Amino acid sequence: METLRLMVVDDEPGMRAGVIRALHDYTVTLSDVNGHVGFELDAASTGEDAIEKIRTSPPDILLLDHKLPGMSGLEVLEAVARDWPQMLTVMITAYATLETAIAATKRGAYDFLAKPFTPDELKSTIRKAASRQILARQARRLAQEKRQVRFQFISMLAHELKSPLSAIEGYLQIIRDKSAGSDPAAYAHMLDRSIVRSRQMRKLVNDLLDMTRIESGQMSRELVDLDLRDAVKAAIETIAPAAAEKNLAVELDAPQPAMLNADRREIDMLLNNLLSNAVKYNRPGGRVRVVLRADGGGVTIEVSDTGIGMSADEVSRLFSDFYRARNAKTRDILGSGLGLSIVRKLALLYAGDVTVRSEPDKGSTFAVVLKQ
C-alpha cells in the first residue's frame, strides 16, 4: 500500500483534531493505479511552525487554513509553491469568496475547501488530491526507469561497439606504421579481420534498426498468405555458404504446406536469425535440422543444431537485448546479441512465442509458434 504524508495547518485546535480524527485509518482505493493509499498525518498551528516542519519532512498534501496568526495562509502557500512545487495544497477557510479562491489558485493552490465542511466532503477532497499525487509519483518513477533503461541501453551499445572499433583501429595503426614486418600476408590478414569487424558493427546497427522498428510499431507490414516452406528454403540457401565452411548438413522436414498470413520480411528476419545462430554455434561436421509443422491455429518452426549448447542459466537470459553467452567456446563467435531478442519480438507480433531446449555440448532446439 502506498503512503502519503498529509499535514493540516490551522490555528483552531478543534479543527486540527477534527481533521486528524476524520482521516485516521482512512484509506483510498484508486482504480486508476490498482492500489490502496493510506495517510501519515501531522499538524501545525501556525504558518511558521508549518514551514519548519515542511523543511524537515515535506508532506505530499497540505491542508492550509487561509487565516492564520502571524504568517498568513497565502504567504505559506506562496512559499510552498516556490520551494516545494510537488506538494498539493488545499486551502481551508471560513471566507469562501470568489476573490479568495482566485487569489489562492494564482498562488498555486490545488483545491479549495470551505468551512464548515463535513468528514465526507473532506475525504472527497483528499481522495482527489491523493489520486493526483499517486499518479504524479508513478509518472516520476516511470521517468526514472526510462532514464535508467536508456542509460543501460547506451552503455551496452557503447560496449558492443567499443571492441570491434578498437580492433580495427589497432590493425590500421599497424598497417600504417608497417610494424608487422614485410610479409604482405600479415597485412592481408589484418585487413580481413578489419572487414569482419566492420561487418559485425553493420549487423549490430541493422539489428538495432530492426528492433526499434518492431518495438515502435513503425515497421511497414504487408500481410499476405504465405507458405512458410518457401521462406525456410530461402533462408537455408542464405546460410548455405557458412554451413559449407563448417561441413554442416542442413535438413528440412516440411512435407505439408504451412500457410500463414504474414509479412514476408518479418518471416525472413526471424528465420535468418534462427538459422544463422544454428550455424555459428554448431560444431564442424554437425547438423542443422528445420522442422515445419502446421496445425489448426498456426505454424510451429523448430530449428535444432548439434552445437555447443547452453547451460540453464544462459538459457534463462537468452532473449534479453544484447545478451550473448560468454565462455571459452563462444569467445571467437561474433554477434550483436540482438538476434534472439528480435525473434521473440517478432513471434509476439503473431500472438506466439519462442522456447528453447538446450544441453551443453549436445546442442539446442528453438521452437517458434506463430498463430493466425
Image (spheres, rainbow, N blue to C red):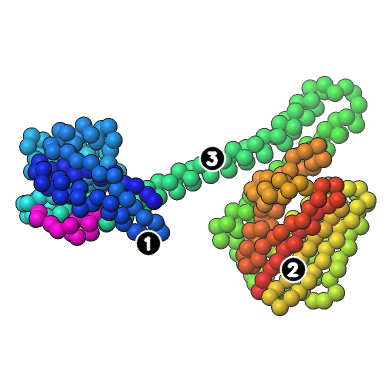
Q: Nearer the viewer, residue 284 or 203?
A: 284
Q: Residues within 10 Å of mark 3 (few under 14, many from 20)?
A: few
Query: In this figure, which residue is indicated by the disc labeled 3?
Result: 151
Q: Position of residue 365 (x, y in %)?
A: 79, 57
Please, is residue 316 above or below residue 167 in the view?
below
Query: As drawn, is 128 to the left or to the right of 115?
Result: right
What residue span does the magenta drawing correspond to?
A: 115-126
- Closer to the eye: label 3 or 2: 2
Whichever of labels 1 and 2 marks the residue nearer the N terminus, that label is: 1
Real-space Cα separation, disc 3 to disc 2, in angstroms? 37 Å
Query: In this figure, which residue is indicated by the disc labeled 2?
Result: 300
Please, what is the three-letter code of the amino acid marked with disc 3? Phe
Name the mark on residue 31.
Answer: 1
Please, what is the three-letter code of the amino acid marked with disc 2? Thr
Q: Secondary structure at mark 1?
A: loop
User: Pointer 1 and pointer 3: residues touching (CB < 8 Å)?
Assistant: no
Q: Residue at 37% across / 49% down in the picture?
A: 2
Q: Is residue 122 magenta?
A: yes
Real-space Cα separation, disc 1 to disc 3, in angstroms? 32 Å
Quadrant location, the C terminus: bottom right
